[in-house]
């Protein structure tokens, strides 16, 4: 069972990886996955996604999820895969930011 998307092992992730699946099947039953959509604001935000520094990003989503590179990098902090929603929110708020969460 995986709630990943297709081609999450392909590089560059920003050209290959599809969005996470909205459902999965287990024991011939289909289950819906609820996604949380985060928006955040930071003062003087100079954040970078893994693909921002490359013409052809050398990372796949699997690389990012294995903590080879952070999902979000700023001059003050990094947020790596595996951070819980609460940890993410705490880091953003600690640096003067605001968090907005929408649920599908």
Image (spheres, grey):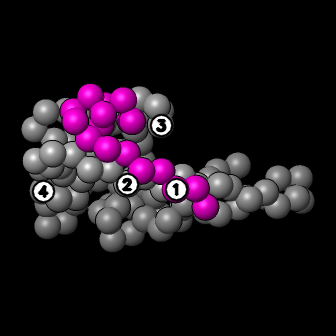
Q: SS class of the residue under badge 3?
A: helix
Mark pair 1, 3: CA separation: 13 Å
Mark pair 4, 2: CA separation: 22 Å
Q: Which residue is mark 3?
A: 85
Q: Categorize mark 3 by other alpha carbons within 10 Å: few (<14), some (14-19), many (20+).
A: few
Mark pair 1, 4: CA separation: 29 Å
Q: Which residue is mark 2?
A: 39
**Residue 7 appears at what percent x and percent y?**
47, 64
Q: Give the label on residue 60, or none.
A: none
Which of discs 3 and 4 lies nearer the camera? The answer is: 3
Mark pair 3, 4: CA separation: 25 Å
Which of discs 2 and 3 lies nearer the camera? The answer is: 2
Q: Which residue is mark 1?
A: 102
Q: Which residue is mark 4?
A: 53
Q: Is residue 12 above or below residue 87?
A: below
Q: Looking at the image, is mark 4 or mark 2 earlier in the sequence?
A: 2
Which of discs 1 and 4 lies nearer the camera? The answer is: 1
Q: Looking at the image, is mark 3 or mark 4 earlier in the sequence?
A: 4
Residue name at image x 26 percent, y 28 percent? 94
Q: Looking at the image, is mark 2 or mark 3 earlier in the sequence?
A: 2
**Residue 66 appears at what percent x and percent y?**
40, 37
**Residue 24 appears at what percent x and percent y?**
73, 58
Q: Looking at the image, is mark 1 or mark 4 earlier in the sequence?
A: 4
Res 87 → quadrant: top left
Mark pair 2, 3: CA separation: 12 Å
Q: Categorize mark 1 by other alpha carbons within 10 Å: few (<14), some (14-19), many (20+).
A: few
Residue name at image x 88 percent, y 58 percent? 29
Q: Looking at the image, is mark 1 or mark 2 earlier in the sequence?
A: 2
Residue name at image x 12 percent, y 56 percent? 53
Q: SS class of the residue under badge 4?
A: loop
In the image, 82: left or right of 57? right
């Amino acid at each position: 069972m995986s709630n990943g998307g297709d081609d999450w092992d392909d590089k560059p992730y920003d050209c290959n990886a599809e969005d996470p699946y909205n459902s999965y099947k287990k024991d011939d039953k289909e289950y819906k996955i609820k996604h949380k959509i985060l928006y955040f604001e930071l003062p003087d935000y100079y954040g970078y996604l893994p693909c921002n520094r490359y013409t052809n990003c050398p990372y796949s989503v699997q690389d990012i999820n294995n903590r080879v590179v952070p999902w979000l990098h700023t001059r003050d902090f990094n947020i790596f895969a595996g951070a819980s929603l609460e940890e993410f929110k705490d880091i953003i708020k600690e640096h003067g930011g605001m968090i907005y969460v929408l649920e599908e």
